[in-house]
Image: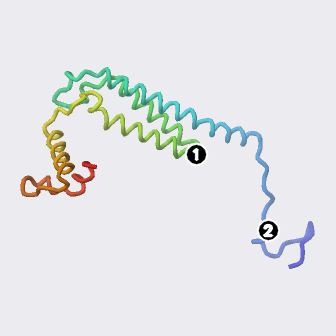
Amino acid sequence: MPQQKRGDSISDPLEWQPPPSKPTIARARRRHRKRSQLPLGLAFCVISLGIGLLALKISPVREIGQYGLIQSLSPLYYFAIFALIISFAWSLRAERSRSFVLASHLTVLVFLVHGAPEVIEGTARFQTAWLHAGFTNYVAGTGGLLPAFDARFSMIRSSRMTSL
């Protein structure tokens, strides 16, 4: 195909591409502002973890009642969860490299929610927890299951995975 000169019409519109646009100062500032959200989001994640752990440490075990842990949790714990959620939403606005920050938010949230009983109580308080600990101990010690003893001993995957 012969070269087109300036001003000539292009017969095939698929071949023509507009010249690349140069970023404006405002666009560059927005991009810089969105990149700076990542360290701020990670900092809020770490701060929320610290506040949450402190709140769990000061939550009294003796206030656990008929509704479970919800009665004994400090209001500071709920503040930490709320701050973590706000920080997660703030980190969603970043354009690049946000996977690590969002994954750290998720990890901290899972730890604060599911780790609360272990941090508050220290040792297991319920018979079900001790029963599953015994199952895991049996599988770890013998390497096998005992299905004739209890139906829960037949859970191959869960028993073997927890005994590792």
Residue wearing tag 2: 16
Circle nearer the N terminus (2, 1): 2
Residue 53 rendering spot, x and y as whole percentages = 37, 27
Q: Nearer the viewer, residue 154 or 67?
A: 154
The quadrant in which residue 54 appears is top left
Is the residue marked by circle 2 packed among few (<14), some (14-19), or many (20+) residues within 10 Å? Answer: few
Is the residue marked by circle 1 packed among few (<14), some (14-19), or many (20+) residues within 10 Å? Answer: few
Residue wearing tag 1: 97
- State the SS at label 2: loop
Q: Which mark is residue 25?
A: none
Instruction: Check the image and name the residue furthest to the left.
Output: 148
Relative to 145, does residue 124 appear above or below in the rendering? above
The quadrant in which residue 126 appears is top left
Amino acid type, callout 2 = Trp
Relative to 79, does residue 42 appear above or below in the rendering? below
Q: Nearer the viewer, residue 72 or 158?
A: 158
Residue 30 rendering spot, x and y as whole percentages = 68, 39
- State the SS at label 1: loop
Residue 154 rendering spot, x and y as whole percentages = 15, 57
